Image (cartoon, rainbow, N blue to C red):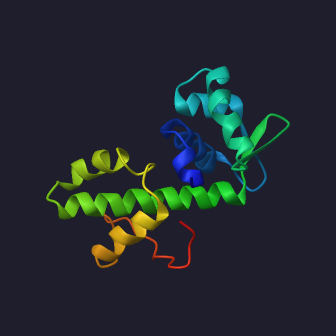
């Protein structure tokens, strides 16, 4: 099973909360992550700890930072989501609904499936919202 398929929606949200708040000099305190997720610090820690075990987040002195693997995982998630949005858009869903539909499957589908959908869609450059889609990685493990 791929790393992305092991994550919950809340764990993806946790990675994103760290990504937008960390700086090259500073990690993100648990209290700030909890606030971004609208959770208590103990609940946020419950989402953060498995991310640390998977090597996606590093904690030091109460501050969390994404590892390079965590950044890569977020980029993979973004690609899965945008390719899924494009698929649903091609089926006739309006752009406002493609995001919700994509969120139903974006964590469950494998890299291989995403690559196949991307090929079938003739390698779209952007999702229905105009956000760029990274190119295929034909040599990637499935």
Find residue 100 and report its horizontal and vertical position in percent. 30, 45
Q: Check the image and name the residue furthest to the right.
A: 61
Image point (62%, 23%), residue name: 43
Find residue 31 and report its horizontal and vertical position in percent. 68, 28
Find residue 87 and report its horizontal and vertical position in percent. 27, 62
On screen, residue 83 versus residue 138, left or right, reads: left
Residue 41: image quadrant is: top right
Image: 120 above or below 66: below
**Total numbered labels:** 0
Image point (21%, 60%), residue name: 89
Q: Is residue 63 visible?
A: yes
Image point (74%, 42%), residue name: 53
On screen, residue 120 versus residue 54, left or right, reads: left
On screen, residue 5 versus residue 70, left or right, reads: left
On screen, residue 10 versus residue 41, left or right, reads: left
Find residue 55 and report its horizontal and vertical position in percent. 73, 50
> Which residue is at the front of the view, 89 or 131?
89
Image: 139 above or below 90: below
Image point (52%, 26%), residue name: 38
Q: Check the image and name the residue furthest to the left.
A: 92
């Amino acid at each position: 099973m791929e790393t992305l398929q092991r994550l919950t929606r809340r764990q993806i949200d946790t990675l994103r909360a760290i990504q937008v708040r960390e700086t090259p000099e500073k990690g993100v305190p648990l209290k700030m992550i909890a606030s971004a997720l609208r959770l208590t610090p103990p609940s946020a820690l419950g989402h953060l700890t498995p991310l640390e075990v998977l090597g996606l987040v590093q904690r030091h002195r109460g501050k969390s930072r994404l590892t390079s693997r965590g950044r890569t995982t977020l980029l993979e998630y973004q690609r899965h989501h945008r390719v899924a949005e494009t698929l649903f858009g091609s089926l006739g869903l309006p752009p406002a609904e493609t995001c919700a539909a994509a969120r139903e499957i974006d964590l469950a589908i494998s890299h291989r499936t995403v690559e196949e959908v991307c090929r079938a869609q003739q390698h779209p450059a952007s999702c229905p919202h105009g956000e760029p889609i990274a190119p295929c990685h034909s040599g990637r493990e499935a």
